[in-house]
Amino acid sequence: MSAEHTTVTRDDIYVHVRSTLIELFEIEADDIHSEARLYEDLDIDSIDAVDLVVELKKFTGRRIEANDFKSVRTLNDVVNAVENLMQRQA
């Protein structure tokens, strides 16, 4: 689903990120919640983080800069960063 052709809600972003974490990284669904820390709680390493950004680029249809995600620590931070990215002009 390309986000640029439809209105994507914060919930849509959360659901997509959550399902990506489950599918790509085989993280248990019960471990994934908005305050879960990516590195400490979900065991996402730097290579996984790159894969996640690539997936989010496909989802948003937008270029993602390293600065967009430099302060991301939790799942909620990822959702906020994607939401901010999608609110910018393409």
Image (tube, rainbow, N blue to C red):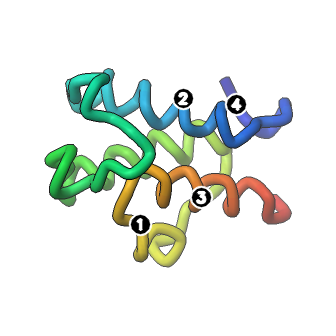
Q: Amino acid at mark 3?
A: Asn
Q: Secondary structure at mark 3?
A: helix
- Rounded to the nearest angstrom, the CA distance separating label 4 from label 3 is 18 Å
Mark 4 or 3, closer to the camera: 3
Residue at the disc numbered 2: 15
Picture residue at 32% right of the left edge, 45% below the top: 51
Q: Amino acid at mark 4?
A: Ser
- Rounded to the nearest angstrom, the CA distance separating label 4 from label 1 is 23 Å
The crowd level at tag 3 (other Cα within 10 Å; few <14, some 14-19, many 20+) is some
Please indicate whether residue 6 sits to the left or right of residue 60 in the image. Answer: right
Picture residue at 27% right of the left edge, 53% below the top: 38
Image quadrant where one finds the C terminus: bottom right
Q: Secondary structure at mark 2?
A: helix
Residue at the disc numbered 1: 72
Residue at the disc numbered 4: 2
Q: Amino acid at mark 2?
A: Val
Task: Give the mark, 4 or 3, whose residue is nearer the N terminus.
Answer: 4
Picture residue at 20% right of the left edge, 53% below the top: 47
Position above or below: 26 against 21: above
Mark 2 or 4, closer to the camera: 2
Q: Secondary structure at mark 1?
A: loop
The circle drawn on residue 40 is none
Task: Give the mark, 1 or 2, whose residue is nearer the N terminus.
Answer: 2
